[in-house]
Amino acid sequence: MTVKIFETPEVQNFLKAVSGFDEQGGNHRAKQIMHRLLSDLYRLIDDFDVTPEEYWSTVSLLNALGGQTQFGLLSPGLGFDHYLDMRQDAIDAEAKRNGGTPRTIEGPLYVAGAPVAEGFARMDDGQDPDGETMWLTGQVRDVDGKPVAGAKVEIWHADSKGGYSFFDKSQSAYNLRRTIVTDAQGRYAARSIIPSGYGVPEGAPTDQVLKALGRHGQRPAHIHFFISAPGHRHLTTQINLAGDPYTFDDFAFATREELVVPANRIEDPAEIARRELDGPFSEVVFDIELARTEAAELQVRHKRPRALEDAADQASQLAGTAEV
C-alpha cells in the first residue's frame, strides 16, 4: 500500500495537539516524551500499514497485560531492563566509576521487609519436599580487597518449583527471602535450597507476546541480590547457576558471564557435620565487590514500585499483585 500521511502538516499539527503542546498546563518533559512516542507509533502504523484489526487486538493484549499486572514481567522479556543496565554501565564508564561486581536486572519479584540476620540465616522454612539443601556463602569486599563489615546482603530466590513466596500463596511468609548483615570479615552465609528456573505462565499475555516473536519465556535457576554499605555504590545483581539449560538462553537477558556460578555437590561427612546438616548438599560461593562512592544517591537503590516497600504508595501495592 502506498498511502503515507505521517509527514503531512495535518498529522504533524495533530501530534502536537495530542501531546499537549497547544496547552499551557502539564509537564513539559512528559509532553516531549509523549510526542516522540506517539510520533514513532504513528509512523509505524503508516510504514507497516497496520490494520484496525491489528491495532485493536493489540489494545486488547495491553488491557490483559495491565489487568494481570504483567508489564513488569514483559519488561525484561523485551529487553528494557537489560537495556537500562547497558545505559547505566555506559554512564558509569563515562564518569570513570569503574570496578565492582557487575550489575544485572532486578526483576519484578522483590518483596520488602524480609527478616534481618547477622552473618548467617536459614532462608527456607523446611517445607519443600523436593528442595535440595544449598549452602550459599561469600565475602563482600571493596575494590582494593578490603572486607566490608556491616554490609546489607538482601537475597531472594524461587523454590524447587520456580515459585516465589508472597506471589505464590502456598509458601510461608518471606520463605527464601532474607537480609544478612556481613560480619567483621565481610562474610555472609545462608542455608537454603537450590532454586529452580521457571517460565512465564502458559497462555498469559506475556507468553502470547513472546510466542508471537518465536521466543520462549524460560529463566534459568538464579538468585537475586541487593548489596549496600555506607560509602559504597548500591549493587543490584543476580547469579545464574551453571549447568542450567537456560543459563545462556534467559528470556530476561539477565545472564552475564561473570555472574555464572557453580553449585558444587558436597558429600564429605566432615563438611556435612560441620554445617550441622543431615546429608549431602550443594555449596554456592558468590563473593561480591563493591565500588566506593561519596555520592549519597548512588548508595541506595533506584526508586520503583516494589511489593510492600511503601504502604502509602498504590503503585507499590500493585507491584505485589503480578500473576507470575
Image: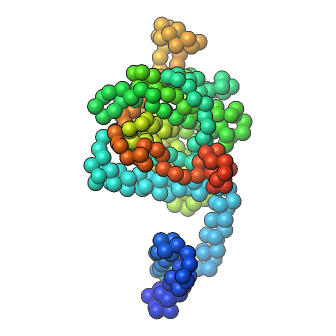
Residue nearest the viewer, comparing 48 with 233? 233
Name the spot of residue 84 as percent of width and height, x first: 43, 55
Q: Is residue 107 above or below residue 83?
A: above
Residue nearest the viewer, comparing 196 with 151? 151
Name the spot of residue 197 as percent of width and height, x first: 55, 39
- Res 195 seen here: no
Name the spot of residue 279 as percent of width and height, x first: 56, 13
Q: How many marks?
A: 0
Residue 58 position by quadrant: bottom right
Tell me the residue at 65%/37% (across/down): 165
* Residue that extends furthest to the bottom in the rendered view of this protein: 9
Q: In the rendered view, how is the structure colored? A: rainbow
- Res 310 seen here: yes
Residue nearest the viewer, comparing 58 with 125? 125
Q: Is residue 181 above or below residue 215?
A: above
Q: Is residue 274 above or below residue 302?
A: above
* Residue that extends furthest to the right in the rendered view of this protein: 170
Name the spot of residue 144 as percent of width and height, x first: 28, 31
Q: Is residue 52 above or below residue 76?
A: below
Tell me the residue at 48%/46% (across/down): 301
Tell me the residue at 63%/77% (across/down): 53
Tell me the residue at 39%/21% (across/down): 185
